[in-house]
Image: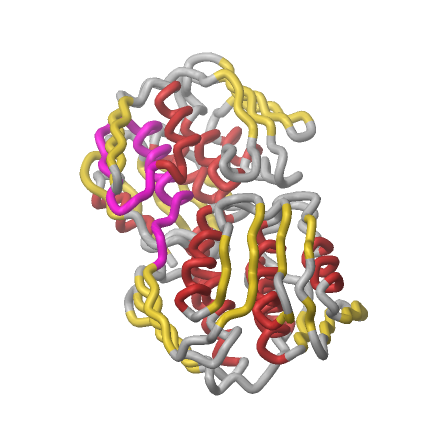
Amino acid sequence: MDIWHIRGGNRLDGICFVQGSKNASLPILAASIISPAQSQLRNVPQLRDIDAALRILRHLGCTAEQRDNDVYINSRGLNKSTIPHDLMLEMRSSVIFMGALIARCGEARLSPPGGCQLGKRPIDLHLSALRQMGCEIEESGGEILCRASSLKGTDIVLPFPSVGATENIMLAATAAAGETVIHGAAREPEIAALQEYMRGLGWAVSGAGTDTVVISGGSPAASVDYRILSDRIVAATFACAAAAAGGSVELRGVEPEQFSTVLHFLKQAGCDIITEKRSVWLRSSGKLRAVGAFETEPYPGFPTDAQPVLMAALLKAVGRTVIKENIFENRFRQVPELCRLGADITVAGNRAEIWGVDSLHGTVLTSTDLRGGAAMIVAGLCADGCTEIYDDGHVKRGYERLDVRLRSLGADIYLDG
């Protein structure tokens, strides 16, 4: 059990280099097996989810190791197509190995994925798309068995721009005869990153970043060297922390346009923000104003992963803010814990209403999930007194040395665990 200890009230000042993206790294780790090749991945964050993905790769017969922020994979020795239940349960992104194993082995045996319990996150879109490509799928006893003696390229229309389904189709399609076209594809920057990596491996992929992605075969390469992009949700978290606590922080190594919707509302709340090509400078008095209303949407809309941390930043903002959550039904799990700090939040269905309070008071909290835990840390930074957050490893799934990075900016925070 991790225990976060925070004494609120300190300004955040200084320079913060933002880590590599977890959500870009994980599908690329899965993609490393679609053909026998060596991959060197740079700027990979050191996280629990990354470690889980590397253990899956090693179980499948690959060599995979992480040295600081570099990952080295040799997938030539892959000799299994089954992922054990215990490894699948560790993270949601484990499901992306399904498309990669089908492409490489013609079959995959796995169980439904784990990860944060944010409500129903069925993989029906993944399975439907794979069936359209010629995959036979059996589901029984909590296990999914996929077999494909041959896959055919086809047009696939996604009724919702699912990131995971888009990634699984892209990977499986590398083994399909002919051209596969995904209509209604997810447009997240992480999809574009997966495309860049796949191109480095020799596969013909185009259109990522738009709603139409085309995969049309290729000539597999023997090796690839690829640098992971910065984590836009981590950048948003630091921006929200600085906005709430007050101070002046420069985020370096980021792509401002990738979290521009978050910056938009922080600016509306009263922060001074300057963006450059690879950096964001934010200054805040810590006295924010409410932003009216916002809602989560698929990219390029406001990201659901940033909703809890922006909520936390606005707990003391003067006025009323309404948040509508359109992606996950249980994305407000952090609310009861934030109210224990003295926040004034009411939830009705997928709608949360926040009235800014004069002050928050430190207490003992329990982390609910990855982003909810981060939200509690942001709130603790601007609360009076001491806050303790008991966390079953959730925050470490997505944030690399968060306590160290916040301390470097002046926060009074340390981690037991």
State whether residue 200 appears in this view.
yes
Q: Residue at x 60, y 32 (%)?
A: 325
In magenta stretch: residue 251: yes
Q: Is residue 144 left or right of residue 234?
A: right
When the figure is inspected, residue 15 is found, relative to residue 22, above or below; the finding is above
Quadrant of res 380: top left
Residue 270: horizontal and vertical position, in percent? Answer: 33, 18
Q: Nearer the viewer, residue 79 or 320?
A: 79
Q: Nearer the viewer, residue 29 or 196?
A: 196
Q: Is residue 138 left or right of residue 224?
A: right
Q: Residue at x 48, y 25 (%)?
A: 342
Quadrant of res 72: bottom left
Residue 375: horizontal and vertical position, in percent? Answer: 45, 38
Span colored in magenta: 228-256
Q: Residue at x 50, y 33 (%)?
A: 302
When the figure is inspected, residue 91 is found, relative to residue 82, above or below; the finding is above
Q: Is residue 127 left or right of residue 73?
A: right
